């Protein structure tokens, strides 16, 4: 499975961005898919995930501001981010978790700054 993340950019505090993750395979075959983020010197952290059944889970920092979704028909996953804060600045990765292997996209940079 190959993943291509896109949609990052520079946005002012309080603004919104929608990230997209295009998968080369059938995303319904995944155990779950998720969005992670990483800043220099820190470990990659989970932002949001969506299970095969469609259940969404969020990190506390994302609850109420971010929404994860997917379109199985076109093998796409999304992350709608509202109310962005400077601390949301990071490289965002999408992940496909299969039964045996995990796959990662290349990352898309989100910068929240005035």
Image: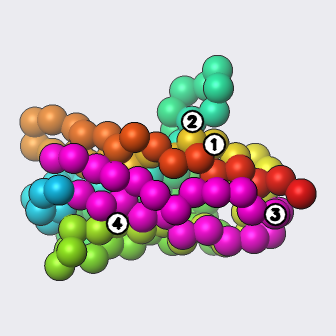
The circle drawn on residue 36 is: none
Instruction: State which region is magenta.
Output: 1-23
| Residue that carries the numbered disc 1 in the rendered image | 90
Q: Is residue 21 left or right of residue 61?
A: left
Name which quarter of the figure residue 37 lies in. Answer: top right
Magenta stretch contains residue 20? yes
Residues at marks 2 and 1 touching, judged by CB atoms closer than 8 Å: yes
Query: In the rendered image of this protein, does residue 11 appear above or below residue 92?
Result: below
Q: Nearer the viewer, residue 104 or 6?
A: 6
**How many residues crowd around disc 4 within 10 Å: few (fewer than 14), some, or many (20 or more)?**
many
Disc 2/disc 1 C-alpha distance (Å): 5 Å
| Residue that carries the numbered disc 4 in the rendered image | 77
| Residue that carries the numbered disc 2 in the rendered image | 38
The answer to which of marks 1 and 4 sits earlier in the sequence is 4
Residues at marks 3 and 4 touching, judged by CB atoms closer than 8 Å: no
Q: Nearer the viewer, residue 31 or 95?
A: 95
The answer to which of marks 3 and 2 sits earlier in the sequence is 3
Disc 3/disc 1 C-alpha distance (Å): 14 Å
Q: Secondary structure at mark 4?
A: strand
């Amino acid at each position: 499975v190959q993943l291509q993340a896109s949609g990052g950019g520079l946005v002012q505090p309080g603004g919104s961005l929608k990230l997209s993750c295009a998968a080369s395979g059938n995303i319904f075959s995944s155990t779950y898919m998720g969005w992670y983020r990483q800043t220099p010197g820190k470990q990659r952290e989970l932002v949001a995930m969506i299970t095969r059944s469609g259940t969404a889970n969020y990190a506390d920092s994302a609850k109420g501001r971010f929404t994860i979704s997917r379109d199985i028909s076109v093998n796409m996953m999304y992350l709608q981010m509202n109310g962005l804060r400077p601390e949301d600045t990071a490289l965002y990765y999408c992940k496909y978790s299969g039964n045996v292997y995990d796959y990662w996209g290349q990352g898309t940079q989100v910068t929240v700054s005035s």
